[in-house]
Image (cartoon, rainbow, N blue to C red):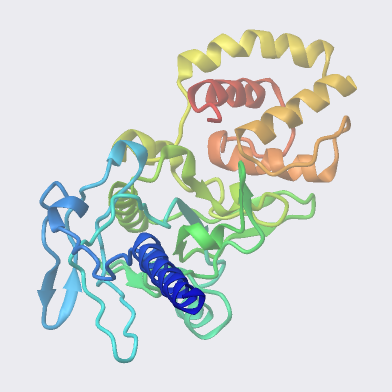
């Protein structure tokens, strides 16, 4: 009897454990997430229908802007679209272009070659220097393109304007055939004028580039502006005011505003010219306007060359490198009109 009861009890225990095992297994069975990704709807990624990429002779182009031009954003392609070709994969442009982009070309820098036509072409195509465009002095209607606008040309060298440095990286360079200047026994530089045909070519070219890339007036500059202690080009005969008046390109001051500053400038130069604080103020204003100049409280050679570069651009009637009342008034008028953002 005792043996029978033992067997019955043991059977009940085994049955109870088995039942608990089943319950545990059912309770903790993990839920496995689906590995099938939800397809991306084109409407989700692009609510506004975009213009299509155009293909011509197997080359792709995008000619429409869908970004905010007021923020200098632009999705237009002025050349063919360059794309990767990864082996075994296909790059598609279903969602092209993204809104968040703009142009690399933020500056336009003007030069003279200091050489004649033939030697200019050799120097800019066969040497370590280059420019995107060359304007000859041969009297025809041709402008030579030497470098793709989407590529970096080696024209500015060590350079800077406002907060930007090494302007080869984000600029288009235009070289103008001109032999530059000669120096007399007193050290005075005498520059060679540009022909009327060259001026018209350069103006038309500059206007086209500035409008396509939305380059601001403050970024249309001379080589001497971005490298004032090294360079003089394109010199005082380049017609910056004419470019501003006739083609609405680049910077120029308002005469009435300059005159308002001129009276005080006369007083400053009569009483404060050699004061260390005034010298420091002049250099600070040149730096704020855009020139890369070291601040100090004395007139030095670097300051003279920087003032000379400023005068080439904005007061070409006298480019002696001395900060006089008129130059000082012009600088202040320009700073008011084109403040640093």
Residue 35 relative to residue 240: left or right = left
Identified at 22% across, 62% down, the residue is 96
246 vs 59: above or below: above
63 vs 247: above or below: below
Identified at 74% across, 26% down, the residue is 282
Residue 161 at x, y percent in the picture: 60, 45
Identified at 70% across, 42% down, the residue is 306
Quadrant location of residue 147?
A: bottom left
Whether residue 55 is visible, yes or no, is: yes
Number of marks: 0
Residue 150 at x, y percent in the picture: 38, 67
Residue 46 relative to residue 232: left or right = left
Identified at 36% across, 68% down, the residue is 22
Residue 2 relative to residue 304: left or right = left
Residue 236 at x, y percent in the picture: 55, 45
Using the image as rendered, state which of residue 255 and residue 30 is in the foreground. Answer: 30
86 vs 52: above or below: below
Outermost front residue? 1
Whether residue 133 is visible, yes or no, is: no
Quadrant location of residue 86?
A: bottom left
Residue 286 at x, y percent in the picture: 68, 33
């Amino acid at each position: 009897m005792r043996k029978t009861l033992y067997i019955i009890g043991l059977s009940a225990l085994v049955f109870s454990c088995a039942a608990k095992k089943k319950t545990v297994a059912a309770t903790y069975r993990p839920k496995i997430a689906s590995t099938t990704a939800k397809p991306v709807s084109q409407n989700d990624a692009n609510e506004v229908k975009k213009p299509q990429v155009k293909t011509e002779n197997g080359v792709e182009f995008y000619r429409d802007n869908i970004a905010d031009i007021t923020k200098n954003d632009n999705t237009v392609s002025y050349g063919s679209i360059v794309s990767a070709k990864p082996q075994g994969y296909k790059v598609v442009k279903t969602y092209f272009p993204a809104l968040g982009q703009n142009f690399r070309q933020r500056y336009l820098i003007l030069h003279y070659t200091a050489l004649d036509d033939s030697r200019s072409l050799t120097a800019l195509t066969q040497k370590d220097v280059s420019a995107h465009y060359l304007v000859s002095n041969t009297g025809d209607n041709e402008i030579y393109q030497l470098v793709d606008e989407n590529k970096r040309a080696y024209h500015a060298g060590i350079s800077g304007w406002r907060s930007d440095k090494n302007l080869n990286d984000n600029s288009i360079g235009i070289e103008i055939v001109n032999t530059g200047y000669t120096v007399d026994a007193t050290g005075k530089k005498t520059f060679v004028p540009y022909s009327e045909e060259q001026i018209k070519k350069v103006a038309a070219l500059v206007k086209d580039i500035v409008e396509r890339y939305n380059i601001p007036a403050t970024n249309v500059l001379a080589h001497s502006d971005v490298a004032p202690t090294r360079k003089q080009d394109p010199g005082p005969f380049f017609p910056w005011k004419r470019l501003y008046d006739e083609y609405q390109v680049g910077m120029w001051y308002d005469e009435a505003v300059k005159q308002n500053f001129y009276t005080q400038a006369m007083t400053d130069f009569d009483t404060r010219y050699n004061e260390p604080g005034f010298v420091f103020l002049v250099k600070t204003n040149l730096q704020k306007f855009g020139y890369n100049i070291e601040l100090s409280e004395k007139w030095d050679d670097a300051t003279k060359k920087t003032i000379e570069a400023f005068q080439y651009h904005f007061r070409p009637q006298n480019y002696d490198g001395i900060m006089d009342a008129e130059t000082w008034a012009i600088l202040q008028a320009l700073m008011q009109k084109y403040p640093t953002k």
